[in-house]
Image (cartoon, coloured by chain):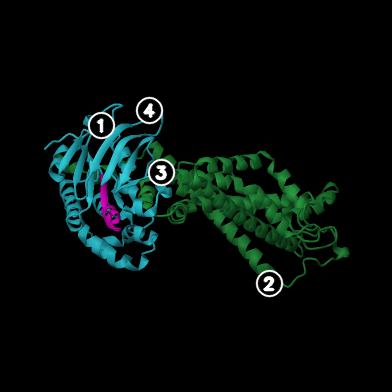
Chain colours: A green, B cyan
């Protein structure tokens, strides 16, 4: 009879009902995490909707110049105020975010594809090929990546795609390292041995067993890369090397407004700045929650 | 003939795990290899399955000396040896359904069209129900998964079968069923078997002869001295 009360099920229930300090701490943490995920999800949804819907639905010209309305502070007519040639800043910010998001997503995807290909090749080939590839990765990583990005951008005429290429070519390194490490850990599993013994070629082992195994990590790296790529686009545009100056991008907006900041007009810099920070933090928040979910033990592996 | 000639193998050339091990396995013969845990039995099994390059010695399969290993080994040689590992949990790709696990060798060899029929045939031979075939590895027990792994090893009708502690983690009835499936396959095809393990009773009853690990370490002379036991 005493055995009955010690069945695993009963014990778990009894333990779960004891209010220990550790458990209450756990619930608190979970609720902040939920709050963070919900806020991030809401912000990302709003951002994406604004970027997708505002340009086709609102028939307003973001380039419309009105010198009589220049540098107006925020009001009902212009919630974010106007810039030094009287363009509406809210509209400019939405268009700027559109460009920045496009660059961010395109660059993150390209970087992830390149990084996954290189990392998987290094991990799957192994031996001297692995060492050679990873030394190349180390070499590229040893150059400051903003500097390398500026160098790449400077070779082309200003435009969206040079910026994408520049950000992508400087950001595939961490993905390559992550993918290689994952492939190396998968490669020694007995199921790979079984596949080899069953006559699978190196290519088939990679495509059928190794790549699907690293896909969650690679996808996570891609999502974490989006905010980083957006920051890079803004940085390049701010330096005047990214997008052409007439194109509204968040970096260009901040760069244009620099002069009026000293004259006390804070709104042309503040709002584009917020548009850089808030969506990137929201994406990073979602990606962080996802990372903790798929890999709770490795919180420090990927940084924003 | 599957001949292991004075094999020295391991993961560090300075301290090999297996030294000068020799063994001859005739077609249709079943040999049990007994040895304590950690003595290098599994390494030897991997060498015999062309999965691990030995530091010295030769593996001769039906008169062909194996010169290249793993992916580089000729495909006909690789698939002539089927292998079942100890830990079923690690030996099946967690993303594939059991039917795909079993069909994988056929697909890898461009024999996709015969896969469905062969899977059904193998599932029956090892005692897997159609319902289990649609599940993924984490949804079945170790014993059921090991049955699938055995089916996968038999999928290409290998002439040689290597069972590396196939039944070590399983209960007696599953072990008996798996051994039964292996023996059915061997009676049907006349395949040779190398069963590695430390269960003296099981290997004694299962195999034609058993070899004790210690008996084979013949130092530098490298002579074949297979011990017999009941």
Q: Answer with left or right where residue B91 lies relative to residue A92.
A: left
**Residue B198 location, x and y as percent?**
21, 37
Return the residue nearer the eye: A176 or A231: A176
Q: Answer with left or right where residue A303 lies relative to residue A19.
A: right
Instruction: Tell me if residue A271 can be seen.
Output: no
Q: Mark 3 points at which residue?
A: A188
Q: Answer with left or right where residue A52 lies relative to residue A8.
A: right
Q: Is residue A141 above or below residue A231?
A: above
Crowding around mark 2 (Cα neighbors within 10 Å: few <14, some 14 to 19, many 20+) is few
> Label 3 vs label 4: CA separation?
21 Å
Residue lying at 40% horizontally and 45% vertically, measured from the top left: B69
**Badge nearest the viewer, 4 or 1:** 1
> Label 4 vs label 1: CA separation?
21 Å
> Label 2 vs label 1: CA separation?
84 Å
Q: Name the residue under label 4.
A: B15
Label located before the other in sequence (4 or 1): 4
- Parent chain of label 2: A
Tag 4 secondary structure: loop
Return the residue nearer the eye: A282 or B2: B2
Crowding around mark 3 (Cα neighbors within 10 Å: few <14, some 14 to 19, many 20+) is few
Question: Are circles 2 and 1 on residues that touch, CB within 8 Å?
Answer: no
Q: What stretch is highlighted in magenta?
A: B149-163
Q: Mark 1 points at which residue?
A: B223
Return the residue nearer the eye: A289 or B69: B69
- Parent chain of label 4: B
**Residue B129 location, x and y as percent?**
23, 62
Q: Name the residue under label 2.
A: A56
């Amino acid at each position: 009879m005493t055995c009955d009360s010690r069945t695993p099920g009963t014990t778990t229930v009894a333990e779960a009902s004891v209010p220990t300090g550790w458990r209450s701490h756990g619930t608190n943490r979970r609720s902040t995490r939920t709050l963070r995920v919900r806020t991030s999800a809401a912000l990302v949804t709003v951002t994406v909707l604004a970027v997708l819907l505002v340009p086709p639905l609102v028939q307003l010209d973001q380039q419309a110049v009105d010198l009589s309305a220049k540098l107006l502070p925020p009001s009902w007519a212009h919630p974010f105020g106007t810039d030094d040639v009287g363009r509406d800043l809210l509209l400019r910010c939405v268009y700027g975010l559109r460009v920045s998001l496009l660059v961010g997503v395109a660059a993150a995807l390209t970087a992830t594809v390149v990084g996954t290909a290189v990392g998987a090749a290094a991990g799957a080939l192994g031996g001297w090929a692995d060492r050679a590839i990873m030394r190349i990765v180390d070499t590229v990583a040893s150059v400051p990546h903003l500097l390398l990005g500026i160098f790449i951008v400077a070779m082309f005429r200003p435009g969206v795609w040079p910026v994408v290429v520049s950000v992508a070519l400087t950001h595939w390194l961490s993905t390559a390292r992550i993918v290689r490490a994952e492939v190396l850990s998968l490669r020694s599993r007995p199921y790979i041995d079984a596949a080899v013994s069953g006559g699978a070629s190196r290519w088939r082992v990679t495509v059928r067993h190794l790549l699907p195994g690293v896909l969650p990590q690679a996808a996570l790296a891609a999502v974490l890369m989006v905010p980083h790529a957006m920051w890079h686009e803004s940085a390049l545009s701010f330096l005047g090397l990214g997008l052409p100056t007439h194109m509204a991008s968040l970096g260009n907006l901040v760069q244009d407004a620099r002069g009026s900041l000293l004259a006390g007009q804070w709104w042309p810099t503040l709002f584009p700045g917020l548009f850089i920070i808030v969506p990137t933090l929201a994406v990073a928040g979602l990606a962080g929650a996802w990372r903790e979910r798929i890999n709770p033990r490795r919180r420090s592996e990927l940084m924003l | 003939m599957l001949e292991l000639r004075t094999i020295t193998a391991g993961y560090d050339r300075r301290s090999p795990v297996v030294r000068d091990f020799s063994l001859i396995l005739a077609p249709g013969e079943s040999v049990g290899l007994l040895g304590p845990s950690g003595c290098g039995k599994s390494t030897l099994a991997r060498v015999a399955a062309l999965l691990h390059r030995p530091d010295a010695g030769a593996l001769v399969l039906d008169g062909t000396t194996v010169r290249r290993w793993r992916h580089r080994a000729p495909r006909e040689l690789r698939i002539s040896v089927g292998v079942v590992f100890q830990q079923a949990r690690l030996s099946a790709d967690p993303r594939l359904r059991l039917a795909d696990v079993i069909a994988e060798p056929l697909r890898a060899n461009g024999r996709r069209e015969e896969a469905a029929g062969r899977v059904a045939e193998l599932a029956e031979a090892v005692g897997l129900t159609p319902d289990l075939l649609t599940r993924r590895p984490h949804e079945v027990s170790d014993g059921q998964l090991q049955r699938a792994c055995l089916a996968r090893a038999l999928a290409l009708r290998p002439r040689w079968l290597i069972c590396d502690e196939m039944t070590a983690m399983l209960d007696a009835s599953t072990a008996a069923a798996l051994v039964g499936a292996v023996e059915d396959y061997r009676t049907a095809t006349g395949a040779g078997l190398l069963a590695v393990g430390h269960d003296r009773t099981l290997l004694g009853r299962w195999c034609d002869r058993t070899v004790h690990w210690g008996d084979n370490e013949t130092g530098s002379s490298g002579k074949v001295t297979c011990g017999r036991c009941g």
